[in-house]
Amino acid sequence: MTKNEKPIHPRKFEISRAAVTCFLERGYHQTGVRDIAKQAGISLGNLYNHFKGKEAVLAFIAEIDGKELNGFIENLAETADPRAALEGFIDDYAAYASRPENALLGAEILTEALRNETIAEVFGKDRRRMIDALAGCLGRGAKAGVFKPLSDETTVAWLILDALEAQGLRSLSNSAQGAATLKNIRGFLLGGVTP
Amino acid sequence: MTKNEKPIHPRKFEISRAAVTCFLERGYHQTGVRDIAKQAGISLGNLYNHFKGKEAVLAFIAEIDGKELNGFIENLAETADPRAALEGFIDDYAAYASRPENALLGAEILTEALRNETIAEVFGKDRRRMIDALAGCLGRGAKAGVFKPLSDETTVAWLILDALEAQGLRSLSNSAQGAATLKNIRGFLLGGVTP
DNA sequence: ATGATATGAACGAACGATCGTTCATAATAT
DNA sequence: ATATTATGAACGATCGTTCGTTCATATCAT
C-alpha cells in the first residue's frame, strides 16, 4: 500500500509550505489561492495542476502535520519506564505546541475541522493515535505502580494534551514567562497521576 | 459611565442574535453580511445603520458573551467555602462550555482574536477577570487549608478552564458519554488541588 | 540519428459568484 | 418639519475555479 503510489511532486511540498506561510499570516479563509500561488512563486493555474482545490491544500497540510506526531507516539510506546515516557512527552510536546507555526496552524485546522468533515477526518486520525498512545502509557504506569490507577486514562490523556496546547496558544501573546508556567503545568499534571 | 450612553436599540440585539445563528452554522468568515441581514429579516443597508460593519457585529457578540461570565465570577467570589465554590464552578462551567452555541462561538471568537486586536481585547477582558476570580478562589482555599498550596494559582486556573472548554468542544462530535467524562475530569482537577 | 507523438508542468485571462460597504431615497414616527 | 429607521441598487474588489494554450522534455517508430 505504501509502494504502489507514485512519488509526490516536490512542487507539491513547495506549494504546501507556501500555503502554511499564508495561513499563519492571515488564516485559512482569509487567504486566497492567488496568495498561495504568489508566495510559492508559481502561477495560479499551475497550483490547480497539483491540488484539486484550496481545501485539498489544507488537507495535505493537515496530513503532514499529523505525521509529525509519530515521533511522540513512538517515544510513548517505546520508552520502557512509563514515568520517564510521560515526563519526556510533556516536555517535548509542550515545546512542539508552543512553536507559533504549530500553535497557530493547529488552531486553524481545528476550527476548520469543526465544520469540514474532510479536514476533521485527516486531522483526527493521528491525533487519536497519539491519545491512545498516551493513555496506554498511563495504563502501563498504573499497572506497574508508578502511576495511580485512573478510572479513565483516555480522559486524562486528553486533559494533558489540552493543557499543553492551550498553553502553547496562549504563549503566542504572552511570550514571556513561558518556561515558569510550563513547569507549573508539568507539576500539576504529574501530581495528578502520581500515587 | 453607565448612564450617559443612550440605550441600545432592540434591533441591534436582534441583528446580533441573527449573526450568532449564522456564525454557528457557517463560521465567521464564511458568513456574509447579507446572510446576517436576511436571517434578521432586515435589509442589507439597515444593518449598517446599527453596526459600523461586520467586525463590529462580532465585537458586540464577544462583548455580550463576555458579560455572560459575570455569573461565574460572582459565584466564585461570593461563595464562602472555596471548595464548594470550585466544585460548583467546574460543574456550571462545564455545562456552559458544552452547550454547542458557547463551544462553537468560543472557538470562533478565539481564533479570530489571534489575528484581530479589536476582538482580542473585547474577548480577553472578562475572560481574564474570570481567571483572576478562579485563581483567587484557589488562593483562599490554600490559605484556609482546604486546598493544597499551589506555586501559581493562575496557571492552574487556566488549566481548569482549558480542560473544561476543550471537553466542551469535543462533546460537539462526541455527544455521547459526556457526563461520565466530565466526572473524570472533575475528579482529576479536584484531586490536583486537594491536600 | 531523425522525425512523430505523447506527456504533463506552467501560464494567465476569463468566468460567474460573492464579498463588505456606500449611498440616494423612501417610509415612519415624533 | 425633522429625525430616525428602512430599503435595495450599485460599486469595486476579490473569491475559487476553469479554460485554452504554450513549451520543454520523454517515448517511440523508423
Image (cartoon, coloured by chain):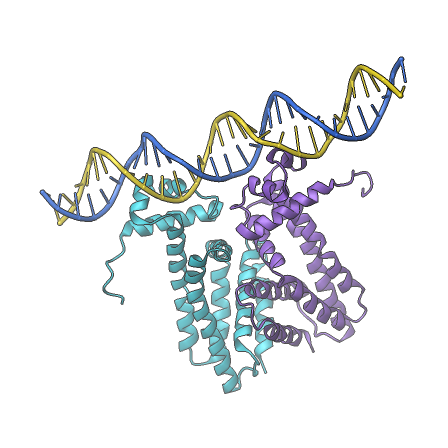
Chain colours: A purple, B cyan, C yellow, D blue
Horizontal side, residue C16 vs residue B17: left or right: right
**Up/down of D21 relative to A65, above or below:** above
Residue A92 location in percent, x, y?
70, 66
Which residue is pictured at 30% across the width and 43% down the height? B46
**C29 left or right of A55 in image:** left
Left or right: A108, with D6 as reference point:
right
Q: Quadrant of the C terminus of chain B?
A: bottom right
Residue closest to the eye, A107 or A82: A107
Q: Nearer the viewer, residue A3 or A148?
A: A3
User: In the rendering, at what x and y percent does residue A195 appear?
Assistant: 69, 78
For the point 67% across and 37% down, the residue is: A50
Identity of the residue drawn at 53% across and 77% down: B153
Nearer the observer, B57 or D11: D11
Vertical side of C8 occupied by B159: above or below: below
Percent x, y of residue A110: 58, 53
Name the spot of residue B160 as percent of width and height, x first: 54, 69
